[in-house]
Amino acid sequence: MAHVLLGASASVAVYKACDLASKLTQRAHVVRVILTARAAELVNPQLFEAVTGQPAHVDEFGAARHAAMDHIELARWGDVLVIAPASADLVGRLANGIANDLLTTVSLALAQNKPRLIAPAMNPVMLLAPAVQRNLRQLREDGWRVLEPDEGTMACGDVGPGRLPEPVRIADVLESMLVR
Ligand SMILES: Cc1cc2nc3c(=O)[nH]c(=O)nc-3n(C[C@H](O)[C@H](O)[C@H](O)COP(=O)(O)O)c2cc1C
């Protein structure tokens, strides 16, 4: 059993994050979800609270605040961080050490010895854009395990790499990282 921080950003694949949260909870992990503000426009945080039984976070300012400094509290609480799905935007912010929302700030505040997994999901043209490839390389160098996206037909109709892998696979990879 682990304390899992599950981050999700505003990709069309964010609906799978709910299934991932549910599967990890069923596997006896305690899951706290952090959504970007844009992700919370696509899917309501309350849904994650319902499947995990834990608070879901979007912001740490004002009424949204849970503790004195949610970013430190959450980073200390988590044994492992998984971000699925990760948008091109989030990948870029993480690769450049930008901490302008709760999810990116928690990612920076997470101790270096804790495993971190990221699953990018986006249109194939976006995925293969030099800036995105450069940012993914940077994340690998910085100690992230980057899960290769699946190939297939995207929501937009394009065919190629960029699909978020199925939640059961993400959960398996995450657990293999915990064992190590
Ligand atoms: C319905 C919808 C689906 C989107 N899907 C993706 C996606 O799969 N991957 C991606 O990188 N961006 C996608 N975007 C664009 C991102 O939402 C946008 O870049 C946003 O600024 C990302 O914010 P965040 O990283 O803070 O969540 C989508 C936008 C919309 C409106």
Image: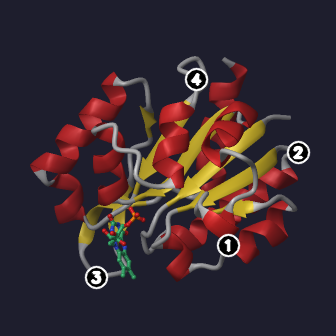
Disc 4 marks a residue whose amino acid type is Ala
Q: Secondary structure at mark 2?
A: loop
Q: Which residue is mark 1?
A: 45
Inter-mark Cα distance, 1 to 2: 21 Å
Residue 161, percent from left and from top: 29, 58
Discs 2/4, front? 4
For residue 157, the mark is 3
Depth check: give the residue in front, 89 or 151.
89
Q: Mark number for residue 111?
A: 4
**Is the CB–ligand 1 distance for label 2 below 8 Å?**
no
Q: CA distance from mark 3 to mark 1?
A: 28 Å
Question: Residue at horizontal 58%, vertical 44%?
Answer: 82
Q: Give the labeled residue for mark 2.
A: 28
Neighbour class for label 4 at 10 Å: few (<14), some, many (≥20)?
some
Q: Earlier in the sequence, mark 3 or mark 1?
A: 1
Residue in the image at 66% along x and 53% along y: 168
Marked residue nearer the N-terminal end (1 or 4): 1
Question: What amino acid does circle 3 point to?
Answer: Gly
Q: In whole angstroms, how far apart are the C-alphas of marks 2 and 4?
A: 23 Å
Say few, some or many: other residues with alpha carbon within 10 Å of mark 2 (under 14 / 14 to 19 / 20 or more): few
> Which residue ends up furthest to the left in the rendered image?
130
